[in-house]
Each structure stands twice: as structure tokens, then as C-alpha cells.
Image: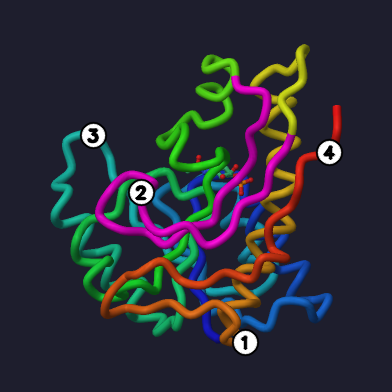
Amino acid sequence: MDVVVLVSGRGSNLRAICSAIDAGTCHANIVGVVSDRKKAAALEFAEGRGIPTRVVSLRKGDDRNAWNDSLTAEVASLEPDLVVLAGFMRVLGAPLLERFPGRIINVHPALLPSFPGHSGPQDALDGGVRVSGCTVHIVDTGVDTGPILAQAAVPVLADDTVDTLHSRIQVQEHRLLPRVIHQIAIGAITLDPLTMSTPVADPTLSLSVPDI
Ligand code: GAR
């Protein structure tokens, strides 16, 4: 299964996918990494691995429709079977969603539908929840609203900061995202592009919260 990974930043999830591919536990082939930020560390990592990279920047005042069209053209030129948003901090427009219906997934650092958006760990702390985690879901036209494929939970500790909570969540992201990609690759998770109905996820993908 050919995969294009969209990134904006550090790329720890991209590294986790690559590690799982190297370990033989994720049967996917990354055919390209596309970023909206030229300086994303994820790009440097991808280039180091010989993965083709593309940058489609969006600056203040830029035409958003033109950006959506360019992003779609770049991703489509790589001919992926699946598009993975791994720390891509932009909302996708209709062109990419229509080009890959039901074939775009995202990892989010909270237990959706709670705390969608750009600051999942901060919002979980502000909300006073005792459990948070990460979610892998199909991308639809909303912000982090698409059908949920898998989730992993982590405790929120009394002395957590945004960084400590996010780090604990990322440990689970790095396990969950490559596993979901693998499950899609082997057909254990079925994405239905016609109905976008909630797919049947492997129950072993979800993790329980340790006792605290
Ligand atoms: C990840 O924690 C991901 O869940 C989050 O950005 C981080 C990227 O880390 N994404 C979002 O918040 C999207 N709403 P990485 O660049 O090290 O993979």
C-alpha cells in the first residue's frame, strides 16, 4: 500500500511509521512526504531516507483555494493508496477530500470527539479530564470529526504540563498510527469511500488505561 504522509513539524509520527516499516510490522511504502512548512524537521528526516518530498506553503493572505488545488495536485502526483496526516496542522479543503474519498486518515492528540483542533493536550488539561489519549480517524470536511478508527488512552497526572501530557500521548500515537496503517494495508480495517460509514476496527488496537 503506497502512502503519502502530510506533515507540518517535527515528524515523530513519520519516524514511528518508518520504524514500523523497517521492523516489518507495517506493510506500507511511503511514496512521498508533503509539508505546508519548508522548515519542518520531518522533511529533513524524509530526505535523509530518500523519500520524495514536496512543500506547498500557505502564507497569510495567500489564496486558500489555490493552495488546496496545489496540495491536491502534489499529493495526487505521488499516486498514493492512502494519505496520512501526521502532525499536519491545516484543515483540508474539498479538492483533496474529493480526490481521495475516505482514503485520508489523521492522528489527533486527544480522545475525540473531545478536544478537537490545534491544542488537544492543552484543552484536555484545561478541561480537567483524568484520562486523555490519541485518536486515529478518517478525515472528513469537519475539524477532527470523521469516523474514529482506533484510540489509545493515557492517564492525566496531577502534575502534568502540556509537554508531559503530550509526550505521554505521543508514545501511544507512535504505536497506534503504524498499527492502523498496517491494518488498513492488510484489509483488517475497511475504509468505505462510498458511504464513509464507521469502519470496523480491530478491538486489539485500543489500549486500556493503567490503574493510577
Ligand atoms: C502529534 O501529536 C499529532 O497528534 C498532532 O501534532 C503532533 C505532531 O507531532 N496533531 C494535531 O494536533 C492535529 N490536530 P509530530 O510532528 O512529532 O508527529
Q: Amino acid at mark 4?
A: Pro
Q: Which residue is mark 4?
A: 210
Question: What residue is shown at x 62% (from left), y 56% (from top)?
Answer: 44
Which mark is nearer the camera, 2 or 3?
Answer: 2
**Which label's residue is closer to the chain start, 1 or 3?**
3
Q: Position of residue 74 (x, y in %)?
A: 33, 71
Residue range highlighted in magenta: 129-154
Q: Amino acid at mark 1?
A: Ile
Question: How busy is the neighbourhood of tag 4: few (under 14 within 10 Å), some, or many (20 plus)?
Answer: few
Question: What residue is shown at x 44% (from left), y 41% (from top)?
Answer: 113
Mark 1 and mark 4: span between their CA atoms? 29 Å
Q: Is residue 131 left or right of residue 77?
A: right
* Tag 2 secondary structure: loop
Specify whether tag 1 is near ligand 1 (CB below 8 Å): no
Specify whether tag 4 is near ligand 1 (CB below 8 Å): no
Q: Which mark is residue 145?
A: 2
**Which label's residue is closer to the chain start, 1 or 4?**
1
Looking at the image, residue 22 lies above or below residue 163: below
The verdict on residue 140 being magenta is: yes
Q: Is residue 47 left or right of residue 158?
A: left
**Which label's residue is closer to the chain start, 4 or 3?**
3
Q: Amino acid at mark 3?
A: Lys
- Which quadrant of the structure image shows residue 21? bottom right
- Please tell me which residue lies in front, 187 or 71: 187
Q: Which residue is mark 3?
A: 60
Q: Which residue is mark 1?
A: 186
Q: Position of residue 34 (x, y in %)?
A: 45, 62
State yes or no: discs 1 and 4 in contact (Cβ < 8 Å): no
Which mark is nearer the camera, 1 or 3?
Answer: 1
**Which label's residue is closer to the chain start, 2 or 4?**
2
State yes or no: discs 2 and 3 in contact (Cβ < 8 Å): no
